[in-house]
Image (spheres, rainbow, N blue to C red):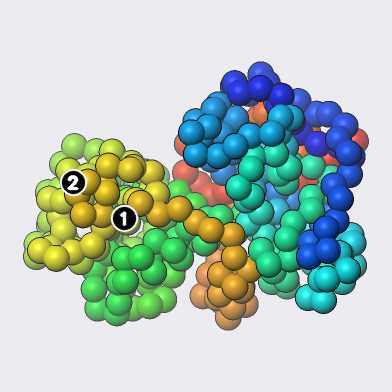
Amino acid sequence: MKAMTYAQYGGTEVLSQTQQPTPKVSPGAVLIRVKAAGVNPVDWKIMSGGLDALMDTNFPVIPGWDVAGVVEAVGFDTPEFKAGDEVYSYGRRDTVHGGTFAELVALPAAIVAHKPASLSWEEAAALPLTGMTAQRTLDTLGVSAGQTLLIHNGSGSVGRTAIQLAVNGGVRVIATASAKNHQRLRELGAEPVAYGPGLVERVQALAPEGVDAVADFIGDVVEETLALLKTGGRHASIADWAVMGHGGTYVWVRPDAGELERLSALVEDGTLSVDVAQTFPMQEAVQAFEASMSGHGNGKIVLTGFTN
């Protein structure tokens, strides 16, 4: 099968299209023909060697954790699915090797969910890691109706999803973003503020009493977070381990079909929408990584299938 792979750590120069063996389908797994694969910053950070201390790597690596596609085959102990089912998944495994930037990927059934019918392939591939990260962060913070949540980087994919989930729960959301993204954040129900120098004062003007919780989706904002939190407030980060030294929680998402089903229900009832910023054919994964590295902030980047 065709796949995008790299055989050593490095920048985008190590990534290329190759031929790889078709994955085996174990008893409790599904083989998925990939229609679209989401691009996440973690994909190119892993490629650079940035997570080598946390995860074993088996070269050559097929990158990619998000996928949407059609079930090609199932293992004999997989009653949940059948060939032809439309599915999606956050397909991270503990060993970095067989990812979703390929024609086919085999994943454990326990981390695969039926694709929401209302989502396109591209939207479905954009949702799993983004949506589950936002969901896990809000669960960790325990924000409830009537409370105020500050989101650092509200215009990123995780931030946009978290805004929708929090607003749906009756939470007041203040979110940082560049001015060009403020209107979109207002449409999602947040009160946007510009990031950068003077952030603390701008947020205090909106919430003089402080905020109940802070979700950090950008990193390097611990000082601002602590200055704005009420006494007893909670904070969590997906981008900065330093929060753990200041009473906060670092969030890492575990693959789980049940969590995907929670997101599916919100999509189907119209609560949650997905913004896709750009799409690239699979063989242009290098260009997709470069776009991701630029920090566009207008939604998710997605790879579609190979075009030749």
How would you rate the neighbour count of disc 2 (Cα within 10 Å): few for under 14, some for 14-19, many for 20 or more?
Answer: some
- What label does residue 224 carry, if any? 2
Kind of residue at badge 2:
Glu
Q: CA distance from mark 1 to mark 2?
A: 16 Å
Kind of residue at badge 1:
Thr
Q: Quadrant of residue 67?
A: bottom right
122 is higher (above) or lower (below) than 172:
above
Secondary structure, mark 1, is strand
Q: Are marks 1 and 2 in contact (CB under 8 Å)?
A: no
Q: Percent from the top left, x then y, of residue 85? A: 83, 69
| Closer-to-camera residue (295/233) | 233
* Residue 84 appears in the picture as rendered: no
Seen at 35% across and 51% down, the residue is 250
285 is higher (above) or lower (below) than 224:
above
- What label does residue 258 carry, if any? none
Dot 1 or dot 2: first in sequence order is: 2
Q: Nearer the viewer, mark 1 or mark 2?
A: 1
Seen at 79% across and 42% down, the residue is 102
- Which residue is disc 1 drawn over? 249
Seen at 18% across and 64% down, the residue is 233
How would you rate the neighbour count of disc 1 (Cα within 10 Å): few for under 14, some for 14-19, many for 20 or more?
Answer: many
Q: Quadrant of residue 229?
A: bottom left
97 is higher (above) or lower (below) than 157:
above
Quarter in which the N terminus is drawn = top right
